[in-house]
Image (tube, grey):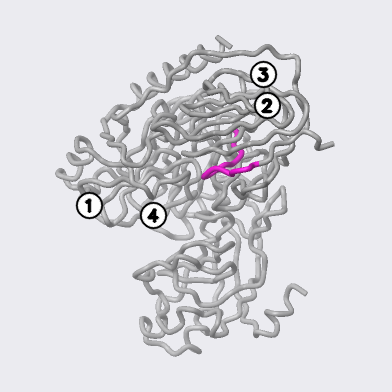
Amino acid sequence: MIKNISNLGDAALYCDFGKEVNIEINTNVIKYFKNIKEKNIPEITNITPSYNKLIISFDLNKTNYSNLKKLIERIDIKNVKENPSNQINIPVCCEDKFSLDIKRLKEKSGLSEDKILEKFFNKKYFCYMTGFIAGMPFVGDLDQEIRVKRLDTPRVKVPKGAVAITEQFANIYTFESPGGWNIIGNTPLKIFDNTKEIEPNLINPGDIITFKQITIEEYKSFNE
Amino acid sequence: MNKNYFELIRPGINTTFQDEGRKNLYHIGITFSGAMDKRNYLIANKLVGNNLNAPVVEFAYQGPLLKYTGNEINFVITGDVSFIIRSKGKEIDGNCYEVYKLKNNDEVDILSTNKSIYGYFNISGEFKLESKWNSYSINTKAKIGPNNGNKFEKNQKIFISKIFSDLNKKKIEYINTKIENIRVIKGTNFDYFSEEGKKTFFGKDFTVSKLSDRMGMRLEGPKIENIVDTNIKSEGLIKGVIQVPPDGNPIIMLSDHGSIGGYPKIGTVISADYDKLVQLSSGSKIKFKEINLSDAETLFKLYEMETQNLLSQI
């Protein structure tokens, strides 16, 4: 199911699962990721799944590209047990002070604010990957009518908890960071818990995500 | 408890703790971090008799001015660094790769790195630190690691939990050499660039920009022309990957880079050249040279042998 394995530099395998971004391809990526991770192969220093690629970095003192490639090619994915994915509900407040790009979204989509929110909240999403910044989930797919491009000039600071959309995906800023996505609201839920030694991230690849709209009062009292 | 400590009279520009780095967390967006120049990090541990994977103080350009309070302690500085030891009114010019003793009220003034960026300060003993996800490395952008993930500020204290006192004063001779030719393996999106763009990449001079840090090294020079797409579907990154964003100026991913990225990868710096690459200060000129995988593996083996030889002399 890996279409091709090549080398990324001298200390990583680049596993290509295809050009497209869809749930089927991504589910394969995640299966391989979980399977390889469970094996705890000591030579491997990182496994990074994304939409349609899997990058496996290794310690060049312990192995090399061709040896690790053989090992990965021998993995029989058919025997992998299907891990049940978690279903996670994310409360989102879309008050003016949080939905920083609602005006842009209205202009680009030609829809009213109500219509945009209706399309955003009325859908189940799939988590394709987490990363870029610690714990940030990339979920999809958005309704065709609310797919817009990145901002022309990225923000220097996107507030923590911002829920933002671009093209077919939504993401959540787990802490304040630069970013160029269209901000639709903000969640009071802790998506990444720095204090946890184990599983600091709430959302993992393969999880099913729903968003629920909350009022400013609910937002304020959420962490009380 | 806590009777042995350093006070940072001057914090230095980017003073953090670093070790081997944080493994197996890219998939949730936590980057590798760790000492930028691994060879100098390892030597800093070996010279003072610490475990090779122990955390050390890393500084960039200008180091801290440290005032010591406590029992006699050995310390060492590695890299290409100018520093002074002040003891009872006397000043000594320090040499890198030589272990010195510090007494109560002595000062170590780490003035600057010489035409390089990173240097390392270490003690014979253990710093009092808490690990985060099995590493003591501080990632200041993501606020991860000891000191709440922050670089050290003026007047902060670094406490010492253990002093190894029965050590001989050791030293080695080592000179940090510079490189101008960075060896690179062609990237997974090499064909996104025009023939002219490829020629520009492998052949023309690039200059290290001031906007470089532990996350990435930005380069300035002739633009590299993309003829396919200036974006790819976001995918994993590793240390040493060279991405070319729409403006045509390459960026090399360094130890604190984001875990995924969406710009085409024109190449990856070979592992053997990484320690020397990170030491290139802003304004340095570099050239990229193409190399194949098997030569890169051989060069890494040679580089590692050289490192092990250095360590075995200690």
Q: How far apart are marks 3 and 4 (CA)?
A: 43 Å
The dot on residue B262 is 4
Give the magenta part as a residue range.
Answer: B8-19
Quadrant location of the C terminus of chain B in the rendered image: top right
In this picture, residue B143 sits left or right of residue B6: left
In this picture, residue A122 sits left or right of residue A101: right
Q: What residue type is labelled 2?
A: Lys
Q: What element carries label 3?
A: loop
On what subunit does the disc labeled 4 rest?
B
Q: What residue type is labelled 4?
A: Gly
Residue A224: image quadrant is bottom right
Question: Are tags 1 and 4 found on a single chain?
Answer: yes
Question: Are tags 3 and 4 found on a single chain?
Answer: yes
Report the residue that reaches farthest toward the left: B196
Q: Mark 3 points at which residue?
A: B49
On what subunit does the disc labeled 3 rest?
B
Q: Of the residues under marks 3 and 1, which one precedes in the sequence?
A: 3
Nearer to us of marks 3 and 2 is: 2
Where is residue B47 drawn, in percent x and y?
61, 18
Task: Characterize the local packing of mark 1: few (<14), some (14-19) or many (20 or more) Cα atoms within 10 angstroms.
Answer: many
Q: Mark 2 points at which residue?
A: B88
In this picture, residue B167 sits left or right of residue B256: right
Q: Is mark 1 on a helix, strand or loop?
A: loop
Task: Characterize the local packing of mark 4: few (<14), some (14-19) or many (20 or more) Cα atoms within 10 angstroms.
Answer: some
Q: Of the residues under marks 4 and 2, which one precedes in the sequence?
A: 2
Q: What residue type is labelled 3?
A: Gly
Nearer to us of marks 1 and 2 is: 2
